[in-house]
Image (spheres, rainbow, N blue to C red):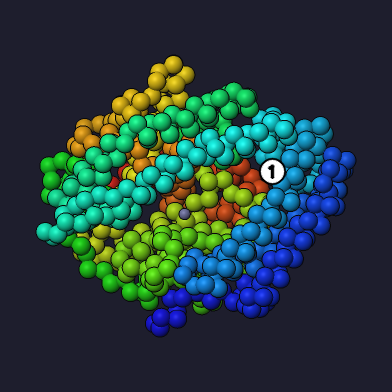
Amino acid sequence: MSKEDMMWDLSQLVTSADPTSIQNQLDSMVAEAGKMRTQYHGKIHSLDPKGVLKLLETKDALFLKCEGTYKYCHLMYSANSTDDVAKKLNDAARRALMKAQQALAFVDLELGKLLAKAPSVVTDPVLAEYRHYLERIVRRVPHMLSETEERLVITKDKNGVDAWEMLQSDWLSTRTFEIEIEGKKKTLPYGEIIGLYRNPDRDLRKRANQTVYKGLGEDDILWASAIRAVCEDHLQMCELRKYPTPMTQSLIANDVDQQTIDSLMKTITRNVDLYQKYLRLKAKLLGLSKLANYDIVAPLPHVAKMDFNWKNARKEVADAYSGFDEEIGGWIDEMFEKRHIDAAVRKGKTSGAFCSSWLAGKTAYILQSYNMNIGSVYTLAHELGHAVHTYLGSRAQKPSNLQVSMCAAETGSIFGELLLTEKLLSKAKTKEEKQAILATILDDFGMTVFQVSARVFFEQSMYDAIKRGEFLDGKAVAKLWTAARNKIYGDSVDWLDVMMWEWTMKPHYYFANFRFYNYPYVFAQLFVFALYRLYKEQGKRFVPKLKKLLAAGSSKAPKELAAEVGFDITDEKFWEKGMKQAEEFIGMLEKAL
Ligand SMILES: [Zn+2]
């Protein structure tokens, strides 16, 4: 496999890769958005259903026309941020996108007003294709303020909650920590020292945790001020915007309802024993009587000898998907053949991994830094699952119907991870291999479903405390965090005392105007485990159902999507199905001890 095969080819996104021509295309994108503004601004209130259809189709067509050029600039920069041409083009593309978005921001606002006045437009048969898109706008309307107030809110936020969010993030990223590694004293920035949490050396993991959280705890005045300001601001905005609970805003954004999330969280609470059982098994695998907090995601001591060079990884992942469905397998092949994956490790490349859809091309691009280990193969399978979601969605839906809720957006990707698990387990020869595969999937499940749930309980408890009139200083916040954490972990893990400061570093708690960032992850993971369970029960009959669900994009709410495969997500029984699948994996791990 040549190095070329591990680098993507972005040329398909544009008609010409000449920077001048790209700049011209970006300029024309802004011009076209301006033209649309002239055509529609202030006039949407008088449109009939046919007129609304024309408006939405024009907006979608404009998106498809401009998407490739913007993606080209953005992806080129992600893969090579030190390249001067990429830097310039990315900057130009971002500016162009911002201008186009600003020019078209009025569309949803004016549509909201029209729909509030004439609700029958939503259900007009002419607009059947956009029905759920319009329903989502209608749900937001009662919480919008007047234009002047909205403008004031933006100004207030800029130097208010946005500034607190930025302070938290800047403060964290500029902290340094001293630690001794192999006899040498080192000073590491936060982003680097956290890499030691997964080091095979237990003592080093412990010292890294101790050093980081002790250091963070010393600034508790700052973290507490920030988190308090962000939460209090949210509560006051909920009052102004008439949100009945602090979670409502996120429910609307995620296209779900309170009853569903309540059922989900109750299922988590009822199943903490299951997670604790896994943690006790993991202690055994690590040769410990009990896990400490720095062992929860530790690697297993006997690393199985599995050769995951790029060629093998491609084969395993492609086989996993083709075993499920030939057409999907064909798309996975296409992703490799057309070189839509940038997997090479190089300097200047964005860290982490992502899948970026290209709707006009009915395909996607993937970026990751492939490291030849089992985690990397899982990342590849995960991102390809996102690509499959795009392949199906872009063939069936307009761009407006592909703004998938965070709760459903991980359906293809996590399902792909489970297909890979099945594939790898079927080939595993030794018990060490089986342990490595099962621990990978279960570590991830545990973190996403249970540890993240602790964060949901924690966030809720902060709003409750503020409403009771309590003052949240650092110690008080830490108490709420450890209470939420202990609800999940019970006595299955020993925590360093300094772990009471764990809440200080999670950026999610500080995101301005974006609260309860956490439960969609819990939702997504358990949702897909339940779907996978159904696949195991129904076999091939299930395949078209999953494809239909993915192809629906955001044209239906997650609740409707689930109903079509026969599930009621407001019912705890549905979520239990996901737990059953986890239980089965844990049982398999127990046998492989
Ligand atoms: Zn994902």
On-image quarter of the N terminus: bottom left
Residue 13 x %, y %:
62, 72
Q: Is residue 209 left or right of residue 149?
A: left
Q: Residue drawn at (72%, 65%), measured in percent from left and top?
A: 27
Q: Residue drawn at (73%, 50%), measured in percent from left and top?
A: 104
Q: Residues within 10 Å of mark 1 (few under 14, many from 20)?
A: some
Q: Disc 1, ligand 1: is the CB inside 8 Å?
A: no
The mark tally for this picture is: 1
* Image vertical order of residue 25 relative to residue 133, above or below: below
Residue 208 x %, y %:
22, 49
Residue 302 x %, y %:
17, 60
Q: In front here: 108 or 581?
A: 108
Q: Residue drawn at (78%, 56%), measured in percent from left and top?
A: 34
Secondary structure at numbered mark 1? helix
Residue 484 x %, y %:
34, 30
* Image vertical order of residue 390 relative to residue 591, above or below: below
* Image vertical order of residue 571 relative to residue 407, above or below: above
Farthest residue, direction bottom: 2
User: Where is mark 1, residue-wise?
Assistant: 132
Q: Residue drawn at (40%, 83%), measured in percent from left and top?
A: 2
